[in-house]
Structure formats: C-alpha cells, structure tokens
Amino acid sequence: MTPPKGTDSSLECAIILAAGEGTRMKSSLPKVLHEVAGRTLVGHVLHAVQGLSPQQIRVVVGSGREKVEEHIAAISPKAVTVFQEKRGGTGHATQLALAGISPKGSVLVLAGDTPLLTTQSLSQLISFHHNGGFSASVMTAEHPDPTGYGRIIRADDGSLLRIVEEKDATDADKIIFEVNSGVYIFDGALLASAITKLTANNSQGELYLTDVLEIMRQAGGEVAAALIDDYVETLGVNDREQLAESGAYLRDRINSDLMRAGVTITDPTTTWIDATATIESDVTIYPGTAILGNTTIKSGAIIGPRTTLESCTVLEGARVVESNCHEAVIGKDAQVGPYSYLRKGTKLGSGSKAGAFVEIKNSTVGDGSKVPHLSYVGDAKIGEGTNIGAATVFVNYDGVEKHETIVGDHVRIGSDSMLIAPVTIGDGAYTAAGSVISEDVPPGAIGVGRSRQRNVLGWVLRKRSGTKSAEAAARHAGSENGHKRG
Ligand code: UD1
Ligand code: MG
C-alpha cells in the first residue's frame, strides 16, 4: 500500500543536471569542474545533496563527460552518471536520468552549478513538500535582477500556476521578481508519468522541466512554490564573474560560521578558507591568509598575516607568519616564518622552528629543534634539540637521485654547512661553520670540512693601490706589517 501523502519524508533519488556546456566560462575545463572554496561547483551541490542521504544520486553529464565522470567517481563513488549526448533541455535531461528506474518515493532535481545551496534549505523544501502533500514543489527566490530566470506565475490566490522562461515571457511576466531557482522536489511516480508528456513547443525548441509542473496541475495534482529567504543560495554560475561572486559569498559564509564557533578572523574580507578546512576555536587568523584543502588547525594556533596553508595540520599553539606551507605537519607550539616555505612531507616537532627564508621538504624536524635562518632542508631526519646554523644546505640531489641526511639529537650544525647526502651526523656532534660535510660525523665529534685560512699580508696595498680599501689599509701600515721583514 502506498503511504498517504505527506508522511513519507525520505528522499529516494536526487538528480543533478550538469550536462550544459558552460560556454560563457570560455574554458577548456567543463563548467561544473571550476572550483570555489575548495570544491568544484558540482562538488558543492553533491555535498549539499549528500547531507539529505538520498537512496540514490544520478548526475546527468554531457559536455566534458570523461572529466566530469572521473571527478564524480572520485568524490561521490555511489553516484550514477547518465550521459546526455545532445542538449535537449532540462526536461530531456531529467527524462534520461529517470530512464530505467521507477521511483516510488520523492525525487529531487537541481542544477550542478549552484554552489551556495545548503542541505538545510533543501531539507526545508522537502519538508514543505511533504507537509503540503504536493505533487511537486519548486524552490523560488525574490531576485533583485530576475533577468534570464524563469518567472513564477501565481494565481490570484497565490497558488502556483506555471513557470515562464525569460525567452517565452511577456512584458508583464518580465516584471515579476520571483524566479525559479531550478530546484524541485517531485512525487517520483507522478514525475515519471508527467515527464513523458513534455513537448518542445517553446522558443528554444527544448523540453522544459518547468512544464512538468503545469502538466501535473492540469492532471489534478497540487503543485507549490516555496520562497526561500535568501536568494543568494540560489545563485548559479555561468561565467567567471559569477564564479568570483559565489566564491566571495562562500568566503563570507565560511568566515561567519567560524567566527560564530570561536575563531578570531581579524579581516574576513582578505581571509579565504576552503569549505574543506577544519579550524578549532581560539585559533587566530590574521589578514591576507588562505587556508586550503583538508587543512586542520588546532586551538590556540596563530596563522598569518599573509600565509597560505594547503592541506596542512597545525597543532595547538603553533605560530605561522607570512609563510607558504603545503601538506606539512606543524607541531605544537612550533614557529614558522616569516617567509618559510614548507613543502610536502615536512613534519615539525613540538616547539620546533623553521625561521626566515627556510625551505623544508620531505623532512622531519624533531621536538625543540631549530632551523632558524636561510636554509634548505630536503629529505632529512633531524633529531631533538638540534640547531641548524644559518645558511645550511642539505645537499640532497646529486643531479640524478635524491638522498637522505640523518642528523641526531642535540647536534650543532655550523652556519653555512653543506651536508652532502647521504650522510649521517651523530648525536651531540658539531660541524664547523662553512664546512662541506660529505662523510659521516660520529656522535660527539666535530666535522671540519674546509681548508685552513691563509692571509696574504699587504695584498691590497700592492694589488689595489689608489682604492678606498688601500687608503683604509694604509692607516694601519705599521700594524698590518706586524710580521714584516726588513
Ligand atoms: C533553468 C530553468 C529556469 C530557472 C533557471 C535557474 C528550465 C526550462 N528553465 O533555466 O526556469 O530560472 O534554470 O537557474 O528548466 N542541463 C542539462 N541538459 C540540458 C539542459 C540543461 O543537463 O539539456 C543542465 C545545465 O547544465 C544546468 C541546468 O540543467 O546545470 C539548467 O540548465 P540551464 O541551461 O542553465 O537552464 P536555464 O536557462 O538557466
Ligand atoms: Mg542556468
């Protein structure tokens, strides 16, 4: 027995229409694969839909099919893709999505280019639909500039009559500000039947999904329009300006949510945080900062100004200033920057430091160890309590292969050391400043890898006479020739 109307709140199927060409993007990338706030456009829509736990998700793909299918398989493996070879309109795309399935429950249909839609609003639409016992419900919005959208035509009593596309609209229709968001929820069985009755009798010669509402109404069903509070959620992306606009709205939304959850963001207009990042309360973020990918930041950390973190983990109390970090783990109370570049595989221990003009990749820096100035550390394991002197280079690349350097605990690497990998510096060892270290240094030893200094006395007076240097040197003619013979 079919349940009485209005009691079944489950969502059987969500259909995402994403076959359009997106010509106005002027891009070799399919429109729905363009990114804002760390997700593709279709990724945002899938994320919102997944929050509803539908039994199945079907995505209609067309333009750039292979790339879109590959992306959907990666981010939403259970979603089924349906191929629309030629654009036949939103009604045609929905027909294809429904082919071979006979939905008994509710079916949600929406577009793949509306990244601002939230699970919450979709869920409100579904409740509206079920509570009213409607055959179909459409989400509408009062848009300040309705140009281009389908207009909502209501009867005198406010009930929904039909939707008229801009291209088919009369002047009287065009002054209506309530528009079709392109999000609908249908009784699946009624949709499957009504969708077969569509005709392309319109100015674009396409099958319009919007006409299904009128077909259902004329067949005696009740169709309804649910006006959303904030039209911004329904904004679609058709060109790069709208891409930037929706990105800015997402930025504001993400920053507001974080601030409400206890994160300090001193300048939300210049702070760009991906929807995929996780930031705990009592983190402080200074201006000009981007926090991207699956970055996690623990409580008490201070980030910025002007810092980019991409897929990093930053632990409690760490401080990252004016730096660029990718796939790095920054330990508790560690300090990074200003002007550090931490690359993939960097692991900084608790209380450690990567200072000014330091680049580190694929290396571990142990607890309390410091790389304070002007250094490159690549493919290294550095123990605890070790200090790497200024301008040290871990020479990891022999021109063909990369090699590893091991540095023990409480080591003192002298400034301007070149550590030629593979090489091991034992616990408690030193290297003399300016050394080229190509052999292992045993624990407790000092490695000296440089030639002894030689002073050629009187050289400037002889070879550079007449220069300021020679003049300055001449003032010391006596002392300079301390060893002067005869
Ligand atoms: C559609 C609605 C309009 C609404 C607007 C909201 C219709 C007839 N019109 O118009 O009332 O105000 O969305 O943004 O539905 N698509 C396919 N295959 C097709 C055609 C479209 O997959 O053959 C996809 C597109 O990729 C897009 C979505 O369906 O994601 C909407 O198509 P679009 O061409 O943007 O429709 P609009 O003209 O904007
Ligand atoms: Mg559109």
Image (cartoon, rainbow, N blue to C red):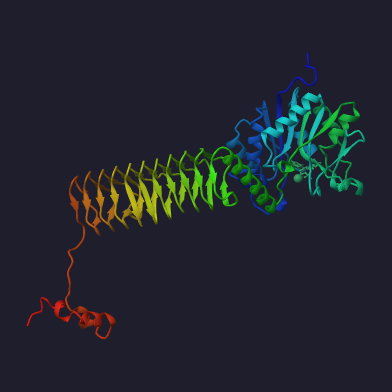
Question: Which part of the image, by quadrant, shows the C terminus?
Answer: bottom left
Let me know if residue 421 appears in the view: no
Report the front residue among 70 and 474: 474
* Image position of 183 (left or right of 348): right
User: How far across and down, in percent of the image, does residue 351 sit?
Assistant: 36, 43
Along the line of sight, the residue nearer the viewer: 38 or 156: 156
- Corner quadrant of residue 149: top right
Tell me what residue is drawn at x 83 percent, y 31 percent.
224
28 with respect to 231 (left or right): left
**x then y, percent, for residue 68:** 64, 42
- Give the quarter the ligand 2 occupies: top right
Residue at the extreme top: 1
In which image quadrant can residue 213 be found?
Answer: top right
* Residue 325 seen in the figure: yes
User: At which x and y percent is residue 401?
Assistant: 35, 50
Foreground residue among 8 and 321: 321
* Residue 76 placement, left or right of 352: right
**Would you place residue 89 above or below residue 450 in this image?**
above
Q: Quadrant of the N terminus?
A: top right
- Number of marks in picture: 0
In x, y percent, where is residue 475? Answer: 20, 81
Please identify the quarter of the rendering in which residue 5 is found. Answer: top right
Q: Residue furthest left?
A: 486
Outermost bottom residue: 466
140 is higher (above) or lower (below) than 360? above
